[in-house]
Image (cartoon, rainbow, N blue to C red):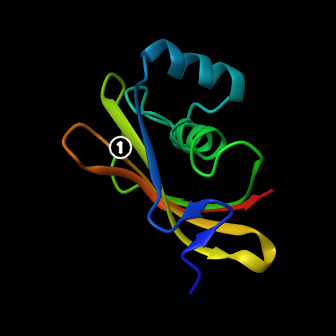
Amino acid sequence: MTTTHKGLTIGQSASSTRIFTAEEIQTYSALTGDTAFDEGCIPGPMLGGMISDLLGTQVPGRGTMWLKQHYEFPAPARVGEAITATVEISRFRPEKDLVYLNVQCVNPNGQVVCQGESLVFVA
């Protein structure tokens, strides 16, 4: 099994923390028309945006093309909570320049509010 590829290593990770406001949720709802959620909850695509930011800016970084994602939301993320998103490289397909990453978001109590896997192409 390949443990490094293009300067990346299995287990390499990055995290960021953010607090979403009620105004941001209202803006999201106005832009998307998505109103099928509790206004105190952060919509899943906004959590996915945190993951997208990490993929494109930290691990793997610039030049990353997001190909596939799978998320589950075992608990709600709440407005005003500090949500921490983490991406971690789990495996490579070096012959195709593909990187698989485990992803998750947790609330301040350490409860997982989003988890899954992303597949990206690295140039």
When asked about the image quadrant of residue 99, the answer is: bottom right
Residue 57 place in picture, x, y as percent: 62, 38
Residue at image coords 35%, 43% = 76
Residue 25 place in picture, x, y as percent: 51, 22
Label 1: how many residues lie within 10 Å, few (<14), some (14-19) or many (20+)? Answer: some
Residue 11 place in picture, x, y as percent: 44, 65
For the C terminus, give its image quadrant: bottom right
Q: Is residue 64 left or right of residue 52?
A: right
Instruction: Name the kind of residue labelled 1 in the image.
Output: Pro
Q: Residue furthest left?
A: 109
Q: Nearer the viewer, residue 114 or 66?
A: 66
When asked about the image quadrant of residue 81, the answer is: top left
Secondary structure beneath dot 1 equals loop
Q: Nearer the viewer, residue 22 or 35?
A: 22
Q: Residue furthest front?
A: 7
Indicate whether 69 appears above or below 19: below
Residue at image coords 56%, 87% = 1
Indicate whether 16 appears above or below 20: below
Residue at image coords 36%, 35% = 83
Q: Is residue 31 left or right of residue 76?
A: right
Q: Is residue 78 left or right of residue 104?
A: left
Indicate whether 96 appears above or below 116: below
Q: Is residue 91 left or right of residue 61?
A: left
Q: Which residue is mark 1?
A: 76
Residue at image coords 57%, 42% = 58
